[in-house]
């Protein structure tokens, strides 16, 4: 016997191909997933986010504030969506995440400028994700120096040059040191939960089917809901252990500030965990073996990481990708976790993120239970 | 249960998967304490029929009762009183014997659970292995565990789907001993099997092919109703002889048994005529023997596939 015979090796290769061909779903996913993800992520991911929503609080009555706002808008980094009248109103917008920036022009901005008193533009940024605000703030710094150059002509030309006619004051809220870990570590909580919850549950039920124990379980008086709930509960506890571990690491290793209520975070976490488990169960009813279940879980997991705002700034993505991201539970949970930990958000602040999570869970659970019922009949 | 009624009493049970009729108008009555054997080729509808009896599947048409519960509407009640043993080992290989039994006992809400588990382990001689993982057991022990698990909630009816496939003869014999003990205590058993020796151990038999019940009765009744004639022949050159005999008119089966051939046919007269020249050949010894159950089943199988051609 030769140590390596081509015909024996070739026999295995051929058999492997035939089996690959038989498992059509797995084969389709092997070909389809890279294609979908290439087009999806290739176009969606952008680490230089532009058109970030901003609000302006303008107490100036002269022309220069308006010129400045127009210049900021034209830079493509800022997209002014609101005009607010009070600081309280502005702060609220930043708190709930409706805008990324607030530009405040003080009273008599134009008058002070003309007098050469170098008035200050205040830019307040929601810096929970430094990657999202960084490029815009850098652009703002050069804008402040040059935006008014065209208006400062003739006798006003004396105001041009160094130092610039206006001062710029930037307040990075919620994460003043622009510490990326403050953003990444709470985000990881959502990512880890998504990964374990979906993979573990989708495998848990598929395994019962693959090993033949499902038939036995179905022949007992146990009802579908009892079986599902019973399978889910242990993993909810595992999810909470994960949340606790990550929170402890965030607190003691990464020194992430924890401004908001942990009780709120733990209670909202249940909704997110349940949403992911529902997805896992739905996958497990669709997959005929554990490999397929695993692939489906990854098919869901990758967009969750890439389109949710975990890896790349959510607002940097094109609108269609933002819509896709909005459909994923992780997107909403990230905003909730970052909101509670870094911004001290309250229940009413996170409400806009809660109902999409609940809706997602209800839809996924309905499909899951419906599909599970048909398991044998 | 009202006196005189059957434990299983169904008529016209039919099930289709797509446009394939898997079970076709089966009528069956089984009495308390009876061991009823279901035989038939693979894919003949035995498993589907059993699944309908224990409420896993709903029959498309037909009616009847199982343990006096309606098979169409009271599937939940049926499940709690039936012990169902699946064809494939379907307990948890990563749980120990005791943990498996404990789980099943909890699902069925067995009173005095710990005691019930102990008794089940003891009854099947598994006490010494109660902490072993089910996955490490050999086929025979797995089957004992499965039986212990189906019995833990004291069902009145056992539905056993090929319980002895891949089990050695000694374990099979012990298994059947246990079944007869249970039946004597009043347990009703419906069992499917491919083994003829097991079929002969049943009180009554049914033969199913392509979803249709082709024969039913005691072993003797089934054999008699088939009306087969069988000869045993011995002599030199049995393999070419078998080929020649198969071509004879009226001969349905020629099967080698050691140094003899069994020649079977339905029409005794036609077969006698066709075989005359062989029977007068002095190098062969011919003997008339009673037909066996296997001959009957092979014959039934051949007839049913002719019908479906």
Image (tube, grey):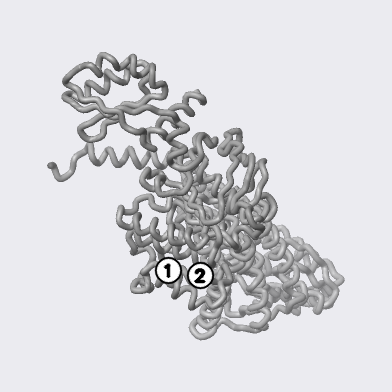
Q: Chain of mark 1?
A: B
- How crowded pointer 2 is (Cα within 10 Å; few <14, some 14-19, many 20+) is rated as some
Helix, strand or loop at mark 2: helix
Question: Circles 1 and 2: CB distance less than 8 Å?
Answer: yes
Front position in the image: A224 or B138: B138
Which quadrant of the structure image shows residue A12? Answer: top left
Helix, strand or loop at mark 1: loop
Asked if residue A113 lies left or right of residue B282, the reply is: right
Residue B92 sits above or below residue B30 on the image: below
Which residue sits furthest left? Answer: A1
Q: Give the number of the disc on residue B131.
A: none
Q: Position of residue B123 (x, y in %)?
A: 41, 69
Which residue does the image show at 63% across and 53% down from the upper left?
B5
Q: Position of residue A210 (x, y in %)?
A: 47, 54
Q: How many marks?
A: 2
* Mark earlier in primary sequence (1, 2): 1
CA–CA distance in space, label 1 to label 2:
10 Å
Q: Give the number of the disc on residue B103.
A: 2
Which quadrant of the structure image shows residue A350? Answer: bottom right
Which residue does the image show at 50% across and 36% down from the upper left?
B215
Q: Chain of mark 2?
A: B
Q: Position of residue A239 (x, y in %)?
A: 55, 73
């Amino acid at each position: 016997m030769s140590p390596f015979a081509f015909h024996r090796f070739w026999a295995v290769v051929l058999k492997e191909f035939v089996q690959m061909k038989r498992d059509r779903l797995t084969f389709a996913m092997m070909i389809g997933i890279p294609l979908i993800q290439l087009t999806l992520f290739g176009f969606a991911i952008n680490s230089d986010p532009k058109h970030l929503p901003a609000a302006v609080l303008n107490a100036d009555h002269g022309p220069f504030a308006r010129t400045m706002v127009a210049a900021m808008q034209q830079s493509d980094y800022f997209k002014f969506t609101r005009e607010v009248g009070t600081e309280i109103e502005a702060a609220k917008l930043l708190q709930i995440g409706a805008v990324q920036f607030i530009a405040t022009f003080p009273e008599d901005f134009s008058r002070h400028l003309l007098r050469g008193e170098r008035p200050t533009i205040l830019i307040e940024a929601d810096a929970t994700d430094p990657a999202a605000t960084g490029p815009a703030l850098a652009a703002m710094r050069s804008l402040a120096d040059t935006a008014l150059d065209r208006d400062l002509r003739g006798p006003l030309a004396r105001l041009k040059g160094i130092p610039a006619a206006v001062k710029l004051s930037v307040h990075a809220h919620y994460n003043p040191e622009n510490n990326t870990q403050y953003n990444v570590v709470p985000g990881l909580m959502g990512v880890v939960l998504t990964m374990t919850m979906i993979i573990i549950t989708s495998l848990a039920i598929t395994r019962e089917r693959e090993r033949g124990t499902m038939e036995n379980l179905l022949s007992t008086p146990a009802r579908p809901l009892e079986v599902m709930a019973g399978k889910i509960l242990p993993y909810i506890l595992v999810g909470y252990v994960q949340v606790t571990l990550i929170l402890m690491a965030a607190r003691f290793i990464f020194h992430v500030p924890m401004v908001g209520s942990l009780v709120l975070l733990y209670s909202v976490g249940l909704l997110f965990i349940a949403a992911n488990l529902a997805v896992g169960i739905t996958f497990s009813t669709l997959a005929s073996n554990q490999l397929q279940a695993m692939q489906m879980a990854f098919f869901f997991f990758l967009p969750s990481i890439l389109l949710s705002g975990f890896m790349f700034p959510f607002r940097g993505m094109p609108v269609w990708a933002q819509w896709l991201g909005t459909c994923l539970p992780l997107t909403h949970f990230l905003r909730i976790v970052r909101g509670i930990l870094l911004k001290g958000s309250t229940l009413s602040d996170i409400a806009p993120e809660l109902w999409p999570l609940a809706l997602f869970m209800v839809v996924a659970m309905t499909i899951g239970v419906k599909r599970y019922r048909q398991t044998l009949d | 249960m009202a006196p005189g009624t059957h434990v299983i009493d169904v008529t016209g049970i039919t099930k289709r998967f797509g446009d394939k009729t898997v079970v076709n108008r089966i009528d069956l009555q089984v009495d308390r304490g009876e061991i009823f054997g279901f035989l038939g080729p693979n894919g003949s509808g035995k498993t589907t029929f059993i699944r309908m009896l224990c409420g896993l599947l709903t029959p498309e048409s037909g009616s009847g009762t199982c343990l006096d519960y309606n098979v169409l509407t009271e599937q939940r009640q049926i499940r709690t009183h039936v012990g169902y043993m699946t064809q494939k080992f379907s307990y948890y290989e990563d749980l120990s014997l005791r943990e498996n039994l404990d789980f099943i006992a909890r699902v069925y809400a067995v009173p005095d659970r710990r005691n019930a588990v102990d008794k089940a382990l003891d009854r099947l001689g598994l006490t010494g292995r109660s902490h072993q993982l089910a996955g490490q057991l050999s086929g025979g022990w797995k089957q004992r565990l499965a039986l212990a698990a189906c019995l833990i909630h004291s069902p009145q009816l056992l539905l056993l789907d090929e319980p002895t496939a891949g089990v050695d003869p000694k374990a099979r014999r012990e298994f059947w001993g246990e079944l007869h003990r249970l039946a004597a205590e009043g347990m009703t058993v419906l069992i499917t099997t491919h083994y003829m020796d097991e079929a002969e151990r049943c009180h009554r038999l049914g033969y199913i092919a392509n979803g249709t019940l082709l024969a039913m009765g005691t072993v003797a009744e089934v054999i008699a109703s088939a009306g087969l004639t069988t000869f045993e022949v011995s002599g030199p050159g049995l393999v070419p002889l078998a080929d020649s005999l198969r071509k004879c008119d009226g001969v349905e089966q020629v099967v080698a048994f050691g140094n003899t051939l069994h020649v079977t046919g339905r029409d005794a007269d036609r077969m006698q005529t066709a075989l005359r020249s062989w029977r007068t050949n002095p190098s062969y010894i011919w003997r008339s023997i009673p037909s066996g159950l296997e001959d009957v089943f092979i014959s039934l199988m051949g007839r049913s596939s002719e019908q479906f051609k």
